[in-house]
Image: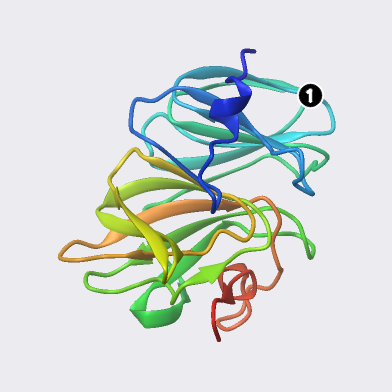
Amino acid sequence: MTVAPIEELYPSDPFGVRFLARGASAVIEARPENLYFFTTYVGVHDVSVDRGDCVYWLADDLETACLRRGPTQIASRHLATVVRGYMPEDRTTTMHQGTTLPYVNGCSTKQLFPPERLGDPTLQLLYMPPHTTEQVHHIHSTVRVVYILRGRGTSVVGTPQHSTRQELVPGMTCILEPMCPHHFETAAEPLVCIPLHVFSSSGSSELDHPMFRGTHLVGQ
């Protein structure tokens, strides 16, 4: 396995965000200061998973999400993330039926792989209708690895004094480090993305699920 040079793994962006375009190829490990270790494989990779770890990945057709415990090896064409020290049962799920839980501002989510216990990783499916935002500006306490599945939107990162905007298009990967102030917006098109929470807050009721619990509003 070849890991990108340190200056590419940990770019100088002061807020801790990295965008990778469709077709990009990269292997990105957790930063040294992170509490939880993961390795994300963007693009085409053969991924080896050790005993004691697990891997979340998207099937070739982008219609199925997969979770498998190690030891194993998988071929990933889009995005795969290995989480160290977590050993759930193997699972697969399709993404045909859309979202099932309400979120803010008309958005909604589905727990593709819910956390089994407080703090476990979780893979979510987030739907944002046109002309909305998935939150006001906010932070998360742990990493989010986000795959843009369908539609278009904009990521706004930073503070009121200094912010940047990045267009979000299908096939793009966005990695948000802990405490990165951000939010996503849509214009005329909806946006569907798949965020992996490397650590999560548990719950699966309409007002108690990880998309709510893991979000901390900025300035409120």
Report the quarter where the C terminus lies: bottom right
Position of residue 83 relative to residue 50, above or below, is below
Q: Position of residue 151 (x, y in %)?
A: 24, 53
Q: How many marks?
A: 1
Residue found at x 15% / y 65%: 188
Q: Position of residue 133 (x, y in %)?
A: 35, 72
Q: Quadrant of residue 152?
A: bottom left
Position in image of residue 127 (x %, y %): 37, 64
- Identify the residue shown where x is 83% and y is 39%: 85
Residue at the outermost top position:
1
Q: Residue at x 72, y 35 (%)?
A: 54
Q: Residue furthest bottom?
A: 220
62 or 135: nearer the eye?
135
Other residues around mark 1 within 10 Å, as few (<14) / some (14–19) / many (≥20): some
Between 123 and 91, which is closer to the camera in this rendering?
Answer: 123
Left or right side of 73 for 16: left
- Quarter of the picture containing the N terminus is top right
Residue at 22%, 73% (x, y): give it.
131
Indicate the colouring scheme. Answer: rainbow
Which image quadrant for residue 66? top right
